[in-house]
Every structure is written in structure tokens, then in C-alpha cells.
Amino acid sequence: MRKIIALTRPQILLVAVILTLATSSLYSQNLYTAKGYWEELNRKPYHEILLKQMSGDSLTVEQKNYLIDYMYFLQSYYDRMTEEEKLAFARMEEQWKLESPRNEQLVQEDFNLRARDRLVNGVYGLYYGASIATIFEMEGGGAVGVPLIMAGLWQLGPVINPKKYQNISVATIRAGNSGKILGALNGIALGLAVAGDGEYNSKWILGLSSVGSIAMGELMFQGQKKRNYTLGYIDIVRHHGFLGPVVTTLGYLSIDENTNLTGVSALAGGIGGLILGHKVAKRYDYSQGDADVISSLTWITTGLGGTLAVTSLAEDTNRGLILIPVASAIAGSVFGHRSVKGVHFNSRQGSTINLASGGAALVGLGMVTIAEAEEEYLYVGAASVCALVMHQVLYSSYKKKNLEQNLNIGRDVSRPLQFSMNVTPENYLLSRKLSPEYFTQNPAVSLPLVSMKLKF
């Protein structure tokens, strides 16, 4: 026989309140994150008033009240974060400072274009000019002069249109350059899809690649100025923007060789890669170093897959073997995304891993060249294996270093932990002589047999 418990109305309300508080507590654990705290800490109105106060300017009553209220809000936000999120914030704060375009804009009003930025602008202008000269079949001085004029105009961009370059940062330039190269690749794919093997395919490819480069470069440049994405976000999007066309193009070539459809598959992969990169980068806050590690591992595993494909194709004519590097590229990218989570490689670590992996690949390639190997797959395989070994050695070293830093948060890393232990057996004899009532009346008194002290 079941017993039915009847709840009164006050009891029902009490249960509802308890469930609501429990639900809100669980939800708040996901709501208050390290990245969210960083964004709240760097709100533009708060920073403007704070900088005004630090510079000695007088604040209005409204500004003073806003500053006080916002500081209370920040403290409350931090207190509601989990310990894991607090550790993540302490670990990533310096990296976010380096990557934050807003932080750079608050520190300096104008970003000075570096020598390499001006050089890259000139190279793209030269390419656009060469495309024009080829399309219109220029000869003589025009074939040389037009590319030089376009290179000069692109370098004069900050002078011709100074408003465009106001309040830019390193991330803005990187986003614009990423857009230029990805736009050029998608333009080439569109040119192949339209012209195929036709008579004027080179003109279509050059023209559409130049138009695509200019359009996408400007789109990503202006988009970065408005949304202030991190360098890690930009590099993850660029990584998938490169990977997408490689995967879809090789996938199609494993079936057929039609030039038009090859261009269509590459274009579909380029667009799909950009969309996928945006979604992936929004789910997790990848650093620039994380993106470097993912990209280098992806291309290394692609080379390993290519080695297997070349080896198999030497004995078999099955075109489906081309799918081997496709699978290895996808596997390398997925594994790379998973492996960097929680490690947060900084930009120096990521670039070092990339540089060292490339150097190891050249060493492996050089060794096979000296040996004068006749098999083609040995050249790709040796370079890929050497790069992978170097990549994983540095990856493991930096990962261990970064994870160990979590133990040093909140103390001076230069001072090691100091542990001491003192054994006092005489306290046992003294405790035997004292009555139990003494300790009951004086609970603060302690006579330990062993005392340990940890200094940090």
C-alpha cells in the first residue's frame, strides 16, 4: 500500500524556491567564466573613466557612482566564478592582454604600420597589377609599369584613405591579410569553376582571384575593426579556410578530374571552411599559439597520409587512395583541436613549434637527398616523420610547463615551496598531566605531537 504525502501550499512554495536556487546555482557555474570576466573587466566605458581618474582628471558625480558600482559588480562576478575559471583567468590574462585589440587601442591611439605590413601591401598590389596587365595583354612598359603603380598605390593606402586605418591594431592587419589570401584562393577556385580548361582560363583565374582577394580582405579588415576578435580566432578561421579546399579538392580528385568540378569543390570547401572555422573558434577561446600548434600538426599528418598514398599508388591505380591524406588531415586537425584545450600555448611557443617542425622537416628531406633515395615517398615521409617528432617533443615540453604554472598562481614563482616539520614528543607527557577539563575550557590551546608548516 503506497503512502501519499500531501504538501501544503507553503511547503510547495518552499520546494519551488529550493529547486529554483539549485538550478540557478548550477546555471551560474556556466554563466560566470574566465573569458566573460575578462570582457567585463575591459568594457570600454569602465576603462575610459578609470583612465581618466588615473590621469588626474576630475570625475563627475555620475562617473564616480558608475565606477564604484562597476567595481562592486566585478568583485561579485569574480566571487561567483568556479575555482577552475579563476585559475584559467590567472593563466590567460597576460595572453589576452597581448591579443586584445581593445587593450591596444586604449594604450595607443594610432597603430604604426610595420615594415612587413607595408611590404605585404606592396606584394598584393603587385599581384593585382600583374593580373590587370595579363588580362588586357599589355606589352612593353605597360606590362611592367602597371604592376609597379598598383604596388605603390597599395602602399600609399594609409595616405590615400587615412580614415580606414584609424584605430587599427595588429589583429586588424592580420585579419585583412588573412582575408586577402583566402579571397585569392577562393577566386582561383571560382575561376576554375567558370572557365575550366577554356581558352581564357588564366585570365578568369587571375581576374577573379584579384577581385576575391580585394573584397574578402576588405570585408575581414572592416569586420575586425567592429568586432575586435582575438588573434587566436583569426588564425583558427584562417586554418579552416585553408584546410576546407584541400579536403574537398582531394576528395573530388579521388573520383574524377573534371576541371570545372574541381573548382566547384574547392570553392565549396573554402566557403565551408570559413563557416566551420567561425563556429569552432566561437566555442573555445583558442590562443594564437594554439592555432599555430593545430595548423602545424594538421599539415604534418597530411604529409604522413600523403606518404601512404604515394606508396600505395605505386602498386595500385585505385584513385580512392587519394582519400588517405584527406583522412589524415582531418584526423590531425581534430586531434590538434582537442590536444590544445586547457594548455593555452602562447604565441612564442606556437611559433617556435612551427619553426622547429619546419626545420626538422628540411633536415629529414636533406638526409634523404644526400642518400639519393629513388623512391619518391621517402622524401615526403622523412620530412613528415622528422617534423612530427620535433613537434611532439616541443608540444610535450611546453604543455608540461604551462600546466605546472597552475600550481604557481598566487605566489612568486621564483621562490620555491618551503616545507618544515617539527616533532615534539614532550607535548604528549604534558597532555597526560593536564586534565581533560582544561582543554574543554580552553579550546584554542593545542599541544600537537607533530607540527608542519608550508610557506609559499
Image (cartoon, rainbow, N blue to C red):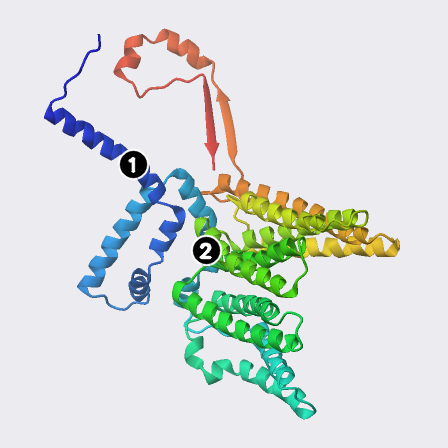
Q: Amino acid at mark 1?
A: Ser
* Rendered image quadrant of residue 108: bottom left
* Rendered image quadrant of residue 263: bottom right
Q: Residue 41, image x and y in percent?
A: 35, 54
Task: Say above or below: 284 vs 448.
Answer: below
Q: Residue 166, image x and y in percent?
A: 42, 75
Residue at image point 30% right, 60% down: 46
Instruction: Check disc 1 and report its element: helix, strand or loop.
Output: helix
Q: Residue 246, image x and y in percent?
A: 62, 57
Instruction: Check disc 2 and report its element: helix, strand or loop.
Output: helix
Q: Earlier in the sequence, mark 2 or mark 1?
A: 1
**Can you name the residue that lies furthest to the left here?**
9
Could you tell me if residue 387 is visible in this image?
no
Q: Label 1: how many residues lie within 10 Å, few (<14), some (14-19) or many (20+)? A: few
**Number of numbered discs present?**
2
Q: From the viewer's side, name the closer residue of 104 and 216.
A: 216
Circle 2 or circle 1, nearest the eye: 1
Residue at image point 42% right, 9% down: 429
- Could you say which disc has been placed on residue 25 in the image? 1
- Could you say which disc has been placed on residue 383 in the image? none
Distance from Cα at disc 2 to Cα at disc 1 = 28 Å
Q: Quadrant of the N terminus?
A: top left
* Rendered image quadrant of residue 42: bottom left
Could you tell me if residue 265 is visible in this image?
yes
- The residue wearing badge 2 is 96
Q: Amino acid at mark 2?
A: Trp
**Can you name the residue that lies furthest to the bottom here?**
141
